[in-house]
Image: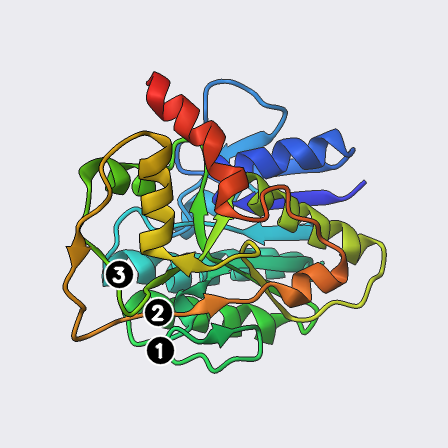
Amino acid sequence: MAKVLIAGCGDIGTSLGKALIKSGHYVVGLRRHPPIENPGINFIAVDLTNPSTLRGIDTDFDQVFFMAAPNEHDLHAYKQIYEVGLENLLCKLSESHHNPNWILISSTSVYGQVDGGWVDETSLTEPERFNGQLQLLSEQRVLSENKNNLVVRFSGIYGPGRKRLLRMAQKGGPIQHEPPYYTNRIHKEDCVGVLKFLFEKRLDGTKLHSHYLACDDEPVPMWEVVSWIAKQLKWKQPDIKSTEKIVTKNKRCCNKRLKELGYHFKYPTYKEGYPQLIKEFKNS
């Protein structure tokens, strides 16, 4: 049994915690406002940006998942999580010199490519926007703490409660058609599956890389996905958007490293992942 800390134990963190508990591990979840119901996770009310709220937590964890997310999409909020909050937790856990392994959840925002080409874990990371820049710095900070720590870069997460593309299809556009503007996705259940898989590989003593890019098998143009969703719901096809003169990001993410390690996606493409979401959307 491993003693696991999930820092930023929200939607995906709670699902991960439940899965780890089911496998026999002890899980503590840090969250600003813990849920009233008890899913078996030992929740502690913590604001990572306030070190005084960390005083009472244990420091003898075997594994830390850092999955805290900013509550706003602005520079200050990202700094508070990926600089202040991360450093506060690293300092707190260093008190016992127990040196737990970390898995830091990052994102594909660390890539700055705009030409629609393929990227993987070895690709250049030169993000132009503050969110990718700060996430890249957080990756470097965690890896500098311990060479055995891991970084997982998630692409766009979809699943229950995440209706962005469904709403885009409902609205009807406009969406860029040519040149193709690619979307990279991963279902929420595969987010949990990937993190649990990597954690278990580490427990088994498998030699791991420092970075893993987590996305499904099929990056596709946004036009294709939204058009397909609209067709399933018998909505009108999206309007064609004039080509953007300035593109801030456009890439296709490759999951080869993760699949070669042995991970099998429950939802390998959007066509497996969206039918249940479409059904729920229709009934909502």
Q: Mark 3 points at which residue?
A: 177
At 63% across and 41% down in the image, what residue appears?
266
**Residue 20 higher or lower than 214, as above or below:** above
Amino acid on which disc 3 is placed: His
Instruction: Give the position of the C terminus as an image quadrant.
Output: top left
In front here: 88 or 133?
133
At 74% across and 64% down in the image, what residue appears?
260
Q: Distance between the residues labelled 1 and 3?
A: 15 Å
Q: In the shown orientation, is residue 248 left or right of residue 203?
A: left
Can you tell which quarter of the image residue 31 is in?
A: top left
Q: Which mark is residue 250?
A: 2
- Tag 2's secondary structure? loop
- Tag 3's secondary structure? loop
Instruction: Give the position of the N terminus as an image quadrant.
Output: top right
In front here: 144 or 183?
183
Q: How far apart are marks 2 and 3 (CA)?
A: 13 Å
At 32% across and 45% down in the image, what residue appears?
227
Q: Which mark is residue 115?
A: 1
Cβ–Cβ under 8 Å for marks 1 and 3: no
Residue 128 percent across, percent down from the top left? 30, 76
Amino acid on which disc 2 is placed: Asn
Q: Residues within 10 Å of mark 2 (few under 14, many from 20)?
A: many
Residue 160 percent across, percent down from the top left? 44, 31
Marks 1, 3: nearer the viewer: 3
**Residue 191 higher or lower than 170, as above or below:** below
**Residue 196 higher or lower than 167, as above or below:** below
